[in-house]
Image (spheres, rainbow, N blue to C red):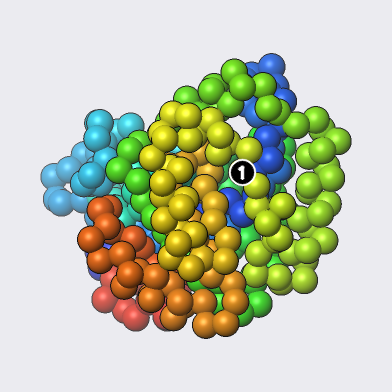
Amino acid sequence: MREELEIGLCTRAAAKINLGLFVGPARADGMHELVSVMQSISLADELTLELAPAGSSQDVVVCPGVPGPAAHNLAARALSLFRGATGWDAPALRLSIDKRIPLAAGLAGGSTDAAGTLRLAAHASGLGEHTLLERLAGELGADVPAALTPGRWLAGGVGERLEPLPNPIGSLGLLVLPVAHELSTAAVYAHADSLQTVRSQRELEDKRRALVTVLSLGTPAPSSDLLTNDLQRAAVDLCPEIKKVLRQAADSGADEVLLSGSGPTVIGLFLRANPLARVARAIAGLPERVPEPIAAEAVGGEFGAVWRRGASQSIGI
Ligand code: ATP
């Protein structure tokens, strides 16, 4: 274990998009019931866990680009929660995060870093059964459990109830259009509440069944009516630029256009012939765009492998 930590252990923390997001009533604790397909994508942060420099007495998280004290980083909380739950007594560690996922963008960047940290700690320590990791992930946040094993998940409850769905057959090409505006998930839900557009339990159940029926066949994406995002109206109210970006995605040739999570990131889905080549063409057609558009595709469980620094990523260990 010590030798691996001297070399450094790495993993990728994949962003997620929501293929359909249906929001139900708020529970007593303010969290909303929902039904959504969480799809991991190849846009990812890269995490490295290694021994902290000699003389360090505490774990340290280095994550340029994320404001606030490092101890508040969700990845730092994941590491300390893991140590507390397992009694792992490794020497002080340094976790470095190469941040590529835009912040507060509806792509669950913090949640996936926390999940990646749990994978690294479990690998390095040899501790942490999968059921324990799932419990810790749930304590860290509603989007963390789905990020533990990248892939496609049907989320229910307040996001913590997960059913695996098969990976899409063939490529699912994605044009990711970040928006230079941060949206807080809590603010978007609060505004959605004020618009009083929540669905009944029965509607949520109908959507859940319809999504399972179509996606259990490995279909790349559900039909347009199931790609609805119930948070879109609230997100557009708070960030009107989203409307323009939705149009930009449609004009670039995407087969479907959607808002990811609570936004503001917009996603163009490329489903038909040569999706990845068409995404590349769409990006070439937006040379001046700021922030830059990003090409991505759907990824599965192997994307979350852990490897020794310097080893080929394809040799997951
Ligand atoms: P979600 O949909 O889970 O709310 P999001 O993509 O909208 O995710 P994040 O990128 O996770 O939002 O960031 C939300 C806030 O969390 C940030 O503004 C930041 O202050 C804080 N944060 C803590 N740790 C991280 C991290 N590792 N990466 C990004 N943000 C983090």
Q: Is 170 on the left or on the right of 205, as rendered? A: left
Q: Who's the residue at 58% across and 26% down the image?
A: 192
Q: Nearer the viewer, residue 216 or 9?
A: 216
Q: Who's the residue at 23% across and 61% down the image?
A: 288
Q: Find residue 87 and report its horizontal and vertical position in percent.
A: 46, 42
Q: Is 210 on the left or on the right of 195, as rendered? A: right
Asked if disc 1 is less than 8 Å from ligand 1, the answer is no
Q: Find residue 199 and report its horizontal and vertical position in percent.
A: 75, 31
Q: Which residue is mark 1?
A: 229
**Count of marks, rendered view:** 1
Q: Nearer the viewer, residue 139 or 21?
A: 21
Q: Quadrant of residue 287?
A: bottom left
Q: Find residue 122 and report its horizontal and vertical position in percent.
A: 48, 55
Q: Who's the residue at 41% across and 56% down the image?
A: 248
Does residue 230 appear in this view? yes
Does residue 89 appear in this view? no
For the N terminus, the quadrant is bottom left
Q: Find residue 127 and report its horizontal and vertical position in percent.
A: 51, 54
For the C terminus, the quadrant is bottom left
Q: Nearer the viewer, residue 4 or 26?
A: 26
Q: Is 21 on the left or on the right of 66, as rendered? A: right
Q: Is 69 on the left or on the right of 23, as rendered? A: left
Q: Who's the residue at 43% across and 72% down the image?
A: 279
User: SS of the residue at dot 1?
Assistant: loop
Q: Quadrant of residue 181?
A: top left
Mark 1 surroundings: few (<14), some (14-19) or many (≥20) residues within 10 A: many
Three-letter code for the amino acid on which mark 1 is drawn: Asn
